[in-house]
Image: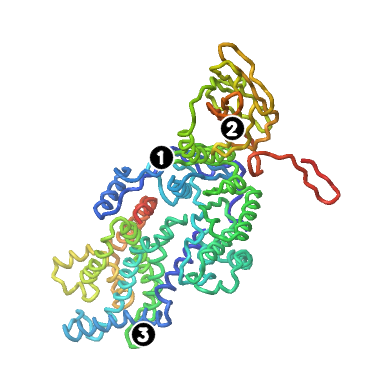
Amino acid sequence: MSNGIFRQLVLRAIRTDYLNNLSGFAWLILQPLMLLAVYAFVFSTIFKARIPGLEPSAFVPFLAIAFWPWTAFSESVLKASQVVTANAALIGKVSFRTELLPLSAVTATFLMHMVGYAAVLIVLRLMGTEIDWFGLLPALVVLAVLYAFAVALALFFSALHVFIRDLGQMLPPLMTFWFFMSPILYSPALLPDHLASLMELNPMTWFVGRLREFLMLGGYTPALSDALIPAVVIILCFLGFRFFRRMSGHFEDFL
Amino acid sequence: MNEYKQRRPGELLVALEGVSKIYPRVNRPGERLRAFFSLLRGQEPKDGALVLDDVSLEVRSGESLGIIGENGAGKSTLLKILTGVISPSRGQVAGQARMAALLELGAGFQPDFSGLDNVRMKGALLGMSPGEINRKLDDILAFADIGEYIHEPVKHYSSGMVVRLGFAVVTASQPELLITDEVLAVGDESFQKKCVRWIEGFLESGNTLLMVSHSMYLVQKLCHKAIWIEQGKTREYGDVFDVTQSYLAFHEARSATEKDNREKAGGEAGLYRLESFCFANELEGTEKILEWGDSLEAELVLHSPDGRPPAALVGIIRADGTPVYGVASEVEGATPRALGDGKFAISIRFDELPLLPGNYAMRGHAMDPEGMRLCDTLELRFRVRGVSRELGYVRLKHHWLSGQETTGE
């Protein structure tokens, strides 16, 4: 019975966020595209950033492959963290599984950005970048884990936001910090050893690295993190769900 | 098609046991944070508003329960706990069926979307699949009866139209447990009637109703049981007629006290006194409970300072002070018998008292022998039990006449 609600919530989120105006869908692609252009210009033209072992022209695909999933991830977590407070009118009045709210927000945002990601991959191929289409399958698994990671964080943050409203101001700069601390704009190979090992602790390093290996760079070697990170994400999802359920009975007191 | 499995009548749907709800004080961010941390530790809020205090009740399949009480008594909070929208601070909620129940018919409507889009959303919230909604769309639109407005954004609707649409979706979703929180009050007369008719059919097919209402008429009409919540506590829980009657009596008595206080000031402690006034075969001071159509007998012992027999006046009033009937012994030529020592006694008997169920009081008065001055007053309370949908205070003898046939009373 919650399938219907989930579907409606996802459709509603897509409609209000992306399809409410005619150009909404175009902006969905244009906005990250423009950001990508800005980063590409600043880093590859002004800062002369290079990826070790790659042509200078490979910087844009190198960035794009990591940038879209990151955008989907950070945008869905930020959006979903507000979703319980935004639907305050619904929560005290209708009895339904409230965890569907963050879940549908993440799903809607991810779905929309994955459409953009597919478009970008095709454009990159047409522009001459070698995209490893066989790597698409493992890449999808990585994206699924990334989605689950976003769901876990969204469950925590959306429940917390009800009690700690400051989270709404805290999260965006933290996300920006996380963006620059992750090897999205640069390769971890550029870092000195002690920083590179520190960066291994950032789960985003694994997501970004694996996506690049599967889709573009090749040279994948199995590692412990391939089992560890999905396992940790599943545990986080479970804990987030438990936390959300425990708190959801008290939402109405604080909204 | 009904998506829920059919339940046996009498199956327990929800049971509350000693449930209390404290709304924490969350006006300032600091309080918010403190309340949150006490929640994390599993403690109940230290200070806050106690809205429900130790309420226990059961809802079984096929029942209809009315929740009555004054504004702010905790009725809506009780519904929210029953439906699982909020958790209680103390106590147990058992067998909590996460049923699609609405506390507000307009809830879940997105003002910018059209009525049709909102019907889909609302249907989904009520547990309907997209296919089911499509199948029932015509029924929904027919029930709501708002015409072409269905394609307009809901923000252009009147509050009545929102309720119409909301209720129409509810009827199509065939819920097992219908919960209404004073929602029927918004629609116009004909739509209200339509809803009440629908609810009656809904109950006849063995479904369950929980209803908050200030209309005792509706509660009596639709519910079998009632719970009276007063300041977060259960004041009375049981048969709907018993509970609504004592609820009404409570309010009647309250408005009567105000009136009485004014009247008493003018009362005259005269020479002729009423020594005692009691129902036959009853102890003085206890409330008498009569069954519908019982007879009622009361005895007055009067005191006269000059040896002349005083006159007795007996009246029956509704608990709110509305006079129903009154008669003086002097008018009908009855004289109290002398008991000696200046005392006189007289009894009055009403055979087959035609009073409708409710709370009443019988007042006995001592008057001077001429029946001119009212000297003393005592009051006895009694209650007429029974089930009746008649209106007013007494049943008047009547016949219905239709065509040639004459039917009995």
Disc on res. B27: none
**Disc 1 element:** strand
Q: CA distance from mark 3 to mark 2?
A: 85 Å
* Amino acid type shown at disc 1: Asp
Residue annotated with mark 1? B53
Residue annotated with mark 3? A123
Residue B319's quadrant in the figure?
Answer: top right
Residue A34 in the image: above or below residue B158: below
Pinpoint residue A36: horizontal percent, then vertical percent. 28, 81
Residue lying at the far top of the rendered structure: B340
Pinpoint residue B113: horizontal percent, then vertical percent. 48, 71
Give the crowd class for mark 1: few <14, some 14-19, many >=20 residues within 10 Å. Answer: many
Residue annotated with mark 2? B383
Q: Is residue B9 left or right of residue B237?
A: right
Nearer to me, B127 or B309: B309
Nearer to me, A202 or B126: B126
- Residue drawn at x 60%, y 13% as measured from the top left: B339
- Residue drawn at x 44%, y 73% as measured from the top left: A15
Q: CA distance from mark 1 to mark 3?
A: 65 Å
Nearer to me, A52 or B261: B261
* Amino acid type shown at disc 3: Val
Q: Quadrant of the C terminus of chain B?
A: top right
Disc 3 sits on a residue from what chain? A
